[in-house]
């Protein structure tokens, strides 16, 4: 089975980390041509992207429609589920920050806030409606259900996971689990995911006592999904800014394992998605390009000289040139 290989990064406009790409992969924001479009430029280099902005707010149809129009035929968007579906405590925290200060202590004990944090049919319908333009354009990749390390394998969690995956059964769903309890009960976890044809996301990140253990094998034939978060152990839990934990550049030697795994998975599944999430200073771009090279994939598009100077591993591999403005009619 010769599968389709999709290699890209997690985000082209990652909240908080976006500015660290300017002047490296993208032209500096100041002085940039008004017609320049980051997404269109990104799509000259990769055939997929993992969308992070939908984690922070429900996707909007008009935005997704514009994404589809600004990317070439064959480009795919994998979309992260809204935080209300996977991170209820984070959702409640975001809601509390919108309240006047005198109401926040009351909100801590509010059963209403707990109820609001539970996804309902309207939330499901809103998410589906938001991504529908991507599906209609044939540019929908997979849905990513990324759960936090606090999401442990319990009867209630297992029931909720089954409900969530079933609710989005019309799409390929990739499930990222981080707590070791899920791999300690590997047979039960595989049975649950396989029932719905969901891919168990294979991840690389710093390992701790409670971290999930994985063997990088596909669990379904439909597709394979891998995410590389980096190995910045020192800043994983203690950092000034959340994006600091992703300040890590994989070496070529470290990437060989993942390139070989992705290459082997192509013979077992219909489609392979591999995303680099070490987005700080466009390190994810550099590592995604290195993986493409290791797999014999062409490095398409031109890379700015500033980018190649920062990541000399690509000096003899990538075509260099100034980032070209995107025609205005591509933005309409």
Image (spheres, helix red, strand yellow):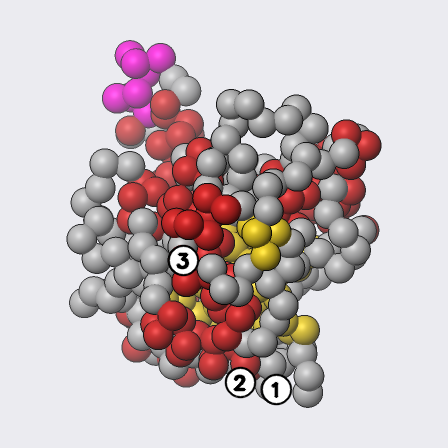
Q: Position of residue 229 (x, y in %)?
A: 38, 58
Q: Can the viewer see residue 318?
A: yes
- Label 3 environment density (alpha carbons within 10 Å; few <14, some 14–19, many ≥20): few
Judge depth for marks 3 and 2 and give the one in front. 3
Q: Quadrant of residue 248?
A: bottom left
Looking at the image, can residue 165 be seen?
Answer: no
In the picture of the structure, the residue carrying the numbered disc 3 is: 312
Residue 159 x, y percent position in the rendering: 46, 63
Q: Residues within 10 Å of mark 1 (few under 14, many from 20)?
A: some
Query: Is residue 17 one of those drawn in magenta?
Result: no
Q: Measuring 41% from the left and 77% from the top, which residue is drawn there?
A: 256
The location of residue 316, given as percent across then percent down, is 50, 64
Range of magenta residues: 100-107
Q: CA distance from mark 3 to mark 2?
A: 28 Å
Point 26% across, 21% down: residue: 105
What residue is shown at x 71% (from left), y 56% (from top)? 75
Image depth: mark 1 or mark 3 in front: 3
At which x and y percent is residue 297?
61, 71
- Specify the label residue 267 is tagged with: 1
Q: Is residue 185 left or right of residue 43?
A: left
Q: CA distance from mark 1 to mark 3?
A: 32 Å
Residue to which mark 2 is pinned: 264
**Which disc is residue 203 wearing?**
none
Q: Secondary structure at mark 1?
A: loop
């Amino acid at each position: 089975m010769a599968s389709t290989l999709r290699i890209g990064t997690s985000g082209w406009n990652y909240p908080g980390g976006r500015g660290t790409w300017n002047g490296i992969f993208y032209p500096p924001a100041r002085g940039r041509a008004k017609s320049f479009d980051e997404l269109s430029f990104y799509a000259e280099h990769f055939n997929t992207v993992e969308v992070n902005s939908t984690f922070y707010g429900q996707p909007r149809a008009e935005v997704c429609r514009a994404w589809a129009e600004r990317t070439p035929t064959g480009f795919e968007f994998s979309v992260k589920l809204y935080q209300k579906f996977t991170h209820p405590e984070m959702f409640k925290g975001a809601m509390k920050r919108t309240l006047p200060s005198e109401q926040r202590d009351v909100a801590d004990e509010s059963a209403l806030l707990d109820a609001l944090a539970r996804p309902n049919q309207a939330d499901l319908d809103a998410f589906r409606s938001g991504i529908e333009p991507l599906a209609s354009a044939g540019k929908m990749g997979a849905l990513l259900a990324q759960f936090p390390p606090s999401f442990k394998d319990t009867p209630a969690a297992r029931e909720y996971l089954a409900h969530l995956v079933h609710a989005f059964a019309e799409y390929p769903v990739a499930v990222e689990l981080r707590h070791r309890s899920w791999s300690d009960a590997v047979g039960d976890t595989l049975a649950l995911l396989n029932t719905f044809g969901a891919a168990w996301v294979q991840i690389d990140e710093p390992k701790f006592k409670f971290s999930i253990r994985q063997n990088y094998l596909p669990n379904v034939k439909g597709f394979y999904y891998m995410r590389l978060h980096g190995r910045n152990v020192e800043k994983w839990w203690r950092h000034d800014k959340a994006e600091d934990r992703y300040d890590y550049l994989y070496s070529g030697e470290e990437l060989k394992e993942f390139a070989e795994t992705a290459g082997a998975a192509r013979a077992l599944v219909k489609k392979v998605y591999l995303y680099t999430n070490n987005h700080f200073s466009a390190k994810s771009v550099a590592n995604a390009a290195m993986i493409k090279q290791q797999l014999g994939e062409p490095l398409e598009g031109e890379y700015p000289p500033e980018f190649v100077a920062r990541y000399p591993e690509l000096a003899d591999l990538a075509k260099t040139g100034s980032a070209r403005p995107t025609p205005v009619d591509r933005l309409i």
